[in-house]
Image: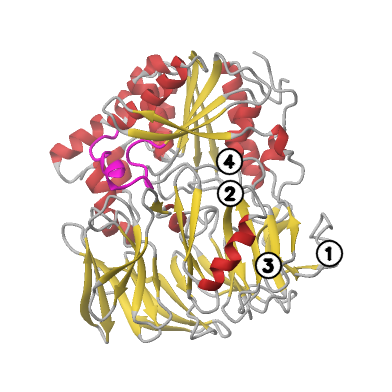
Amino acid sequence: MTAPSKLISVEEFFGPPVRSRALLSPDGAKVAYLAPWRGRLNVFVRDLDSDWTAPDDAHAPDSRRVTSDPRRDIDAFFWTTDGRYLLFQQDTDGDENWHLHRADPYRPDEPVVDLTPFEGVRLLGAQLPPDRPGTAFVQLNMRRPDLIDLFELDLATGRLTTAAENPGDVLSWLRTPDRLLAFTMEEGGDHVLSEWDAGERRPIARFPGADALFGVLPAAPTPDGGGLWIGSSRGSDRTRLVRVDLDTGEQTGVDSHPVFDLDTPRPEADPRFPSSLILHPATGELLGARYLGARQEIHALDTHFAAVLPRLAELSDGDLAHVSCDAAAQRWVVDFTHDRDPGVTWFYDHATGRARRLFRPFPHLDPARLAPVTPITVTARDGLTLPCHLTLPVGVEPRGLPTVLLVHGGPWYRDSWGYDPEVQLLANRGYAVLQVNMRGSTGYGKAHTRAAIGEFAGKMHDDLLDALDRVVEQGITDPDRVAIYGCSYGGYAALVGAAFTPDRFAAAVSYTGMSDLVDLVRSVVPFARRAVENSYLRYIGDPDDPRQEADMLARSPIGRVDDITAPVLLIHGANDVRVHRRNSDRVFDALRARGAEVEYLLNENEGHWFVNTDSNIELYRTLERFLARHLGGCSSSTA
């Protein structure tokens, strides 16, 4: 095959950004952001008006490092509403027992404080109310592992006070200025919003569980305390923005898009993506709403933001992503989603109209050498429309290419236009990359998601094959050189491809994929067991029902390992609490026992997703070598 003109190293793709995730302080004077320190991303602060051209924040005189974690990258952080502190979440080696930590941007030499220092306890939500700037309301499973209680946290002293104890059926809590709200689930899966007062509850509104797989998302209180902004698909296939009146339960439409869904629930699960609601960080006022199809569309819902939004949008040909502003909403720091130039971060001053670029997270990557990501549409064999993305290697004729069918996780998730380093790595190695939003994916209407009920290893897999057939028919893909690869559900799909349709794939890669659906459902962590009724139990099955258990086992690759003929690469984090490592261990042992070709990369310091730079570099070096051997693409170790 003809290789791209120059290979980009794994380290260039998966090394840390020089800076990322910038957030403006409420006073508009300082910016907090992530930058490397001792090989890990930590939180730094610098004055907005300082010199941003210095390449090394660890030694730049204008920057102040306020965290010092040498063990694991920090991913999510935020300013308190008054700007006094920076807060961030951190777990231990991927165990997902998140703790809330406090850092002092004014005293960077002060040690970070763990505000929830309880072993085995997970932070399940943190709300910073604008009317109580020195307080956070945190949800913790501290009393029992399966119950989520609400606590009031004094950010200065670290003192925790119980705000509400879970009687046994509360899935999540939310505070308004004068109310305490609880979401519960009834038998059958419907969600109920209630007002909570001294242990007594007053039901406000009910939401069908079939419409809300993981709860009512998003859910943000109105600043006056009388309402709740939520995503709703009641009476529609599409998710729109509505206001729930907390006195009457009445739902009133606020905004909608004629074709696109409100961009949820992916951002609620993955902080790489900005929330569908753009809220004023100091007041909680609703500024705008995001909708996502092939590209993003933002609706301005505030007069001032309607004037600001066009000026922000003209800074990039990408899609506006994370947004932060000062308390006056005059100074803005924003970044952008882009398929080849990700996270470029800008400052814009609405009072003067001036803007300047602060940084590119990956200045060593030339966008011209990266591959465009192209949205395409495929029609499944039963007529369902499948939104897909196709990425082709730069400088290579798109004929007869080795191809990687890259399947997203969830499956209640979605692929979208934007930058993904593993997509770019594969394209740079000469592979066509096909991503399919098969049935079960979110963001394309309820019917698209619901079409996956009972279709694991069934029509969901047919969707992947139908999309693959499309690029084969177009001559882009060599049908004898196709690998199927994915993480989580995508890893399951890879094992299904290898075991159920072994003639279609030359190789399979399962990254933290489940091989046993019964084991997956029975292993759900205690606090989430009630919450999976509308997802796992509805879509996959209930293992406590013998007939459903038998069907789940029939759809599990572990029962058909003997049918696998292609080489398999297994990747797993030893601390994975979503898909236990035994899902990979058992496949590896079974394949090795019969002398099949199998590799296994087990990382003792990671969980469901690999976070640290060295872990990802090892992962993708292993992946590129494996694919080069079995598909004939390029590898940096052999180029």
Q: Is residue 245 left or right of residue 636?
A: left
Question: Mark 1 = which residue?
Answer: 51
Q: Secondary structure at mark 1?
A: loop
Secondary structure type for disc 3? strand
Q: Which quadrant holds residue 38?
A: bottom right
- Regarding residue 76, the answer to whether it shows in the image is yes
Residues rendered magenta in the picture: 437-456
Residue placed most toward the observer, 177 or 504: 177
Q: Closer to us: mark 3 or mark 1?
A: 1
Hey, what amino acid is under mark 3? Ala
Q: Alpha carbon of mark 3 to alpha carbon of mark 1: how far?
A: 14 Å
Report the predominant secondary structure element of the magenta stretch: loop
Quick one: label 2, few (<14), some, or many (20+) residues within 10 Å?
some
Q: Quadrant of residue 256?
A: bottom left
Q: Is residue 19 left or right of residue 193?
A: right
Q: Quadrant of residue 103?
A: bottom right
Residue 32 bears which disc, if any?
A: 3
Specify how the rendered protein is coloured.
Answer: secondary structure
Q: Which residue is mark 2?
A: 611
Closer to the camera in the image, 459 or 445: 445
Quarter of the N terminus within the rendering:
top right
Report if the CB atoms under discs 4 and 2 are less than 8 Å apart: no
**Label ID, residue 420:** 4
Q: CA distance from mark 3 to mark 2?
A: 20 Å
Is 11 inside the magenta-drawn segment? no
> Percent from the top left, x then y, of residue 163?
37, 83
In the image, residue 145 lies at what x, y percent? 35, 65
Could you tell me if residue 43 is visible in this image? Answer: no
Q: CA distance from mark 1 to mark 2?
A: 30 Å
Q: Position of residue 446 (x, y in %)?
A: 29, 48
Q: At 54% across and 75% down in the image, what residue appears? A: 115
